[in-house]
Amino acid sequence: MVFEKKTKAHEKEQVLKDELAFKVLARRNKMLGLWVAEQMGLSGDAANTYAKEVVAADLDEPGDADVVRKVMKDFADKGIAMTEARLRQEMETLLPAARKEIEAQQRG
């Protein structure tokens, strides 16, 4: 009985951690989409729509490869020079800010 309770508590904790990680990555991708939109000269509704497309792109496969592929293609299509290393650097820079926003949102 005690083992069962501990197992269920652990499972619940893992679900919450997974949910938090998903939300943080979705927020990071939205922030990335807005940054990319700015680089492309988009603003307002067009920037928000683009950011949503970046978030949706992350649902294609596990990891960041799908997002990187989409954004790099979009940069290339617009004739904007961007390296994958620079893009991934921006992704890493945005991650702590995204985590902070999501955790603040969950607290209050």
Image (tube, grey):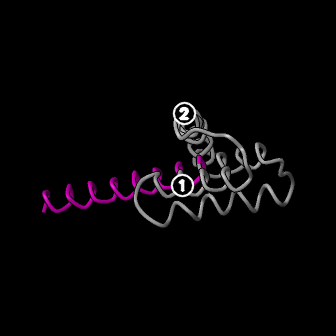
Q: What kind of residue is marked 1?
A: Val
- Seen at 14% across and 57% down, the residue is 2
Dividing the picture into quarters, in which one does residue 77 lie?
A: bottom right
Residue beneath the point at 26% across and 54% down: 10
Element type at mark 2: helix
Q: Position of residue 57 (x, y in %)?
A: 56, 63
- Residue 9 falls inside the magenta stretch: yes
Asked if disc 1 and disc 2 are in contact, CB closer than 8 Å, the reply is no
State the residue at coordinates (58%, 58%).
70
Q: Which residues are magenta?
A: 1-28
Foreground residue among 41 and 52? 41
Q: Looking at this view, is 56 or 40 the one in front? A: 40
Give amino acid for label 2. Answer: Gln
Decide which of tag 1 and tag 2 comes sooner along the chain. Answer: 1
Question: Mainly helix, strand or loop, the magenta region?
Answer: helix
Query: What residue appears at the point 78 percent right and 44 percent down from the top-left corner?
Result: 38
Q: Which mark is residue 67?
A: 1
SS at mark 1 in the image: helix
Question: Dividing the picture into quarters, in which one does residue 90 lie?
Answer: top right
| Extreme-right residue of the structure | 44
Point out which mark residue 57 bears.
none
Cα–Cα gap, marks 1 and 2: 13 Å
**Label 2 crowd bin: few (<14), some (14–19), many (20+), radius 10 Å:** few
The residue pinned by badge 2 equals 89
Quarter of the rendering occupied by the N terminus: bottom left
Q: Residues within 10 Å of mark 1 (few under 14, many from 20)?
A: many
Above or below, 93 relative to 59: above
Residue 45 falls left or right of residue 2: right
Residue 53 position, x and y percent, is 66, 63
Measured as percent of width and height from the top left, residue 71 is found at: 61, 52
